Image: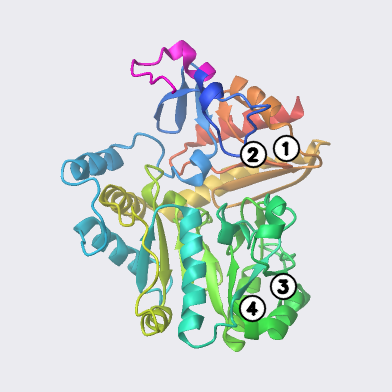
Amino acid sequence: MNSITTAPVDQSQILQKDQQFVWHPYSSLSNPIPAYEVVSANGVNLHLADGTELIDGMSSWWCTIHGYNHPVLNEAAKQQIDLVSHVMFGGITHAPAVNLCEKLVEITPAGLDKVFLADSGSVGVEVAIKMAFQYWISQGQSGKNKLLSLRSGYHGDTFAAMSVCDPVTGMHHLFDQVMQKNHFAPAPKTGFDEAWDEQDIADFAQIISDKHNELAAVILEPIVQGAGGMRFYSPHYLRRVRELCDQHNVLLIADEIATGFGRTGKLFACEWAGISPDIMCLGKAITGGYMTLAATLCTDKVSRGICEGEAGCFMHGPTFMGNPLACAVANASIELLLSTDWQENILRIETTLNAELQPFVALQSVAAIRSLGAIGVIEMHEPVNVAEIQKRFVAEGVWVRPFGKLVYVMPPFISTETELKSLMQAVYRVLAG
């Protein structure tokens, strides 16, 4: 029997015990990448146990849009935890969840009128896919049980989500033999600001035409393909996808987990194309990075189609669905964002990132640069050594975590000009060194 340690752990032993007991995301226990111990955080700064202060360029995987230790979000959490931190959502409701759902319906694209609350982005995607399947089953069309996705896409790490990630570059090819087989169209080639080329949608159009009788839904990341390559594509591509889904009676799922709540310069990336999906997934920044929460929204058509079918209800119910504490903080985070001139602020960040990215073009190791909203990307010719480059970033006083050939930043929206420039200049010194 393992002994149980109840005494406080000596700070000097945290990293040692971390390597002994903790399995970090996408990490090897045989050859672990060193972790850095954070003891506090404030604004855009992470404070390490050894006294090092880092400017966070990642918004903790894109979610802490208001930075850390924000007094408004702190107060929302404190007030709610004294009332009720959690209660089952089956047969019970509460104001934080009701207010959040109402708010999400108000601010998302028109027609998304029903909200299903979940507890993580991947689960939100699972819910969306399950909604699409159950919708068609309820319509007596159980043969519509496949999905069409885009190459270079990423939608999460659970099984249905993995099945619509790029099957080659999407980090999940090892599971190829145990995942549902879906259809994939080539990634969009027309860049965000480039002139539209109708040939860019030709392969997608052919697939949806040929396979529409078996397609339940198209799922994509609107405008920005995130962890699959940090690619920005033309809004017209998204408009054409919406048109083709309507033409061929296929539902459209927009995965806005990474792009929602202002990251691209619109509140939701679908707005760049002026379209509304049938189902939308939200997560990450929904609570300002304070705790995990996700939401899957759908149209009345989808919700009625599901609930008027054989089951009479949607067959899903996470234990922590509608967690009051998370919902209270989400309400505060959304209100905080909307109370500011957030669009002008995102434009400010984009302008600064774009200017600071220009010197990277001269580096021989750099293949391309791009920016959109509060996203800045440096694409390298060769994959980086994450463990080695991480040490150098920390030594320069910044927290940036690359993957593959991509060194990118998604800073908190509260980042000042000085902080943004310090961040990008530190990245430049590392890549130029």
Q: Comparing marks 1 and 3, which lies closer to the viewer?
A: 3
Q: CA distance from mark 2 to mark 4?
A: 34 Å
Q: CA distance from mark 2 to mark 1?
A: 7 Å
Q: Position of residue 239 (x, y in %)?
A: 60, 76
Q: Residues within 10 Å of mark 1 (few under 14, many from 20)?
A: few
Report which residue position mark 3 lands on. Answer: 196
Q: CA distance from mark 4 to mark 3?
A: 11 Å
**Pick the front one: 404 or 30:** 30
Q: What's the amino acid at mark 4? A: Arg
Colour theme? rainbow
Kind of element beneath mark 3:
loop
Kind of element beneath mark 2:
helix
Q: Are marks 1 and 4 in contact (CB under 8 Å)?
A: no
Report which residue position mark 1 lands on. Answer: 359
Asked if the stretch drawn in magenta spans residue 7, the answer is yes
First-in-chain label (1 vs 4): 4
Report which residue position mark 2 lands on. Answer: 356
Q: CA distance from mark 3 to mark 2?
A: 28 Å
Q: Which residues are magenta?
A: 1-16
First-in-chain label (4 vs 3): 3
Q: CA distance from mark 1 to mark 3?
A: 28 Å
First-in-chain label (3 vs 2): 3
Q: Residues within 10 Å of mark 4 (few under 14, many from 20)?
A: some
- Is residue 152 in view? no
Report which residue position mark 4 lands on. Answer: 240
